[in-house]
Amino acid sequence: MPLVQQLAISVAPGIGDALAAYEVGEFGTRARESMKSGSPLGAAGNLAMAGLAGLSFIPVLRGLRGARPLGKAVASTSEAIPGSSTGQLTGVTDLPPDVRYQYSRDVYTDPNTRQMYQRDPFYEAMDMPQRDVFEGHGYYQGEFNPTFVSRPVPRTIPDAQGIPRIDPSDAKTIEQRDTTFGYLTQQEGTPTSRVLEAMPAGTLDTIKITTDKSITQNQFKEIAEYAKQYDLDPISLPDGITFVNNKSFDVLEDLSPEIGNDLSRFISQTIGDPDMLKARGNFDTINYSSFADEFAEGAGELAGTSGAATRKLFQSLDDETIKQLDNSADVRRFVENKLEVDLKIANEKNLPMRRDIRTALTIISDQGFSGLKRVMEKGEVILPGILFLYLGRAIPMVLGETQPSEV
């Protein structure tokens, strides 16, 4: 809907009041989340927004309302540590948990504020409404790493059965964000998902646990190990935990009540919450952006010109999204910071750093995604020796640096 019409609706009596009522609750919820995560300034800001939404019930102040889509937040679960098969910082997953945690936090820290991003900079650049980022625990192929769960709020459209499906244009935005983040941080996979509750039998392939208690990394690991017997992988949520049912990727089937009860009992004992809630539901994979094959292609080879990962990135990004990303100072700082953090840990821990990835990130930090696209289209490959210059910027060689095919 055009912005002018959205604004007109947002100030109309009745509909506008409903939107304002939603926003009072929405920003109030965000304020509580900010306080829980130790961000009093964020809480104050959200309380102020809730107050503005409340003021807009007064007819003369209706213009204070902003237009925003309604909906429930979904979970974009992202790790900052490069995938073990990508050839970038190989061995980082074997470092002690505290080192991996600090690296992840450093990558996901705003260089300006020196605090963890409260909002996902990529969704922010793409104009996707979102709630605060949640810091959780990741588990993938036996590896436990910190995760950052971004929470976009996409529009939904009910299908013939009344199930709220993600609006296709917002689903595309989610896919573009996941692909961009996965490329920049060298992930094998970056997913966005949700749990649909009150679904019919035959689709209840997961269990969602809701609790007010924080789940520690060790508790999460215990739960993950226990859930292996049912071929389930846990996912952190702001209000609890849910599970990926690996079997249901091939054949959708119900998770039996007995399995749900057993998991619920174990989790309750592990985290010490007898009052937690459990519900079976359908694990809905909204998007999964994978670079597993593309990054692995050049992980241990000599320099070439494949550019597989970069081509895949620009198959996802259209010109408008590239422009949005390039216009975002936060996105540019994220890329520059990622480069610096990688160089630091590579030198400190003697980890190999792929030159092609470093070159690609350097191009983005200097000329944006549009600059990288131009390099790709021209077929230019920049392969540094002991020291290389790009646009007049000197980048020092890293001890143990590898030179695989260009990403």
Image: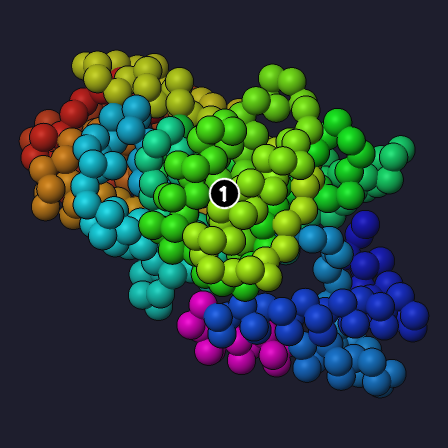
Does the stretch in magenta take in 373?
Answer: no
Q: Is 90 left, or right, of 128 in this rendering?
A: left
Closer to the camera in the image, 175 or 393 = 175
**At x 7% / y 35%, what residue is drawn?**
399
Q: Is 204 left, or right, of 401 in this rendering?
A: right
Disc 1 on helix, strand or loop? Answer: strand
The x and y percentages for residue 95 are 18, 41
The x and y percentages for residue 257 are 67, 36
Above or below for 42 versus 285: below
What colouring method underlies this structural image?
rainbow
**At x 49% / y 74%, what residue is drawn?**
35
User: What stretch of residues is rendered in magenta?
Assistant: 37-49
Q: Is 9 left, or right, of 81 in this rendering?
A: right
**At x 57% / y 73%, what residue is drawn?**
31
- Three-letter code for the amino acid on which mark 1 is drawn: Ile
Quarter where residue 175 is shown: top right
The residue that mark 1 highlights is: 235
Closer to the camera in the image, 144 or 165 = 144
Residue 41 appears anywhere in the view: yes
Q: Is 106 left, or right, of 272 in this rendering?
A: left
**At x 30% / y 24%, what residue is drawn?**
85
Residue 120 appears anywhere in the view: no
Quadrant holding the C terminus: top left
Quarter where residue 405 is shown: top left
